[in-house]
Amino acid sequence: MSDLPTPRNGPSVYLLAAHPNWRESRVNRRLLAAARALPEVKVCDIYVSYPDYDIDVPAEQASAAAANLIVLLHPVQWYSMPALLKLWLDEVLAHGWAYGIGGTALQGKALWLVATTGGPESSYHPQSYNRYFFDAFLPPYEQTAALCGMRFLPPLLLHGAHSASEQEVLAHVAVFAERLKAYPAWPELAELDACPACDVPATDRPQELSNAGPPQGAKALLTDGAAVPFASVGAP
Ligand SMILES: Cc1cc2nc3c(=O)[nH]c(=O)nc-3n(C[C@H](O)[C@H](O)[C@H](O)COP(=O)(O)O)c2cc1C
């Protein structure tokens, strides 16, 4: 699609793969291998890159900014994403960078969710044990994209990852690789709405510490690493 900027250097796809236990993965590890085989895709296997949860925020922001498509690849865990991927969003999608004043780094890009569930599609139904259609769990992803000025692409899901036949898994991996290779030439993108404008009002933005003071109960770190309440730091 012509309205998506194509970076001049480097891969145009940045794929964040998040699986807390690759050794037990049946599907995601094959999706990861397929992505790694594509030169236009830069992959970050976040549980391997950041085993101590110490995310290199500037490096991640540079990788995300260089891409025009960001892919989240993960097994669904508790109707959401694995914890380290959530931390990636918390830290990398910073105010003033991804959203808010001056936060335009991701505008015009796209976010694609590629996820697997243990529950079969039939379990995501009001009459079954997951009680909701799977779409009910997508708004946090979709709105995260929208707040950052990104289009949320139709997710690629494999339900029933444990019970799917070998043939189904192989077909799913093939579709995934095809889509990655073809991006942005996906027929359905022409029909997709533009990203809605989500301007955060100034009153809802984080205040500068010097203006607002610390939030109640906030702690300051002393040089020896001990944490004390702000009120007692430099108090007369
Ligand atoms: C901690 C944890 C939470 C899970 N939560 C869900 C869930 O909310 N819904 C679901 O359908 N499957 C859930 N599962 C199953 C995983 O989604 C499933 O094992 C995974 O998608 C299989 O992909 P893989 O073969 O790449 O590991 C969960 C698994 C774990 C370990």
Image (cartoon, rainbow, N blue to C red):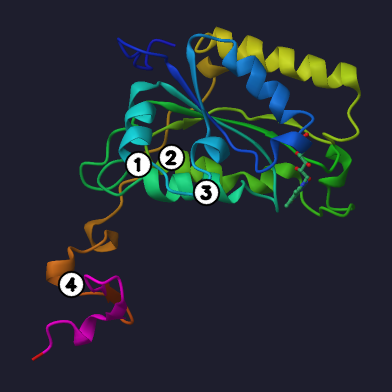
Circle 3 is placed at which residue position? 86
Can see residue 42?
Answer: yes
Q: Secondary structure at mark 1?
A: helix
The amino acid type, in three-letter code, at marker 2 is: Ala
Q: Residue at x 64, y 9 (%)?
A: 178
Q: Is 225 within the magenta? A: yes
Ligand 1 - quadrant of the structure image: top right
Name the residue carrying label 1.
57
Q: Are marks 1 and 4 in contact (CB under 8 Å)?
A: no
Q: Position of residue 24 (x, y in %)?
A: 78, 37
Residue 173 part of the magenta segment: no
The spot of residue 224 in percent (x, y) is 26, 72
Q: Which one is earlier in the sequence, the residue at label 1 or at label 4?
A: 1
Q: Which residue is mark 2?
A: 146
SS state under label 2: helix
Callout in the foreground (1, 2): 1
Q: Nearer the viewer, residue 106 or 195?
A: 106
Q: Secondary structure at mark 3?
A: helix
Q: Residues within 10 Å of mark 3 (few under 14, many from 20)?
A: few
Q: Are marks 2 and 4 in contact (CB under 8 Å)?
A: no
Nearest to viewer (mark 3 / mark 4) = 3
Callout 3: CB less than 8 Å from ligand 1: no
**Disc 4 marks which residue?**
212
The amino acid pointed to by label 3 is: Lys
Q: Nearer the viewer, mark 3 or mark 2?
A: 3
| Quadrant where the C terminus is found in the figure | bottom left
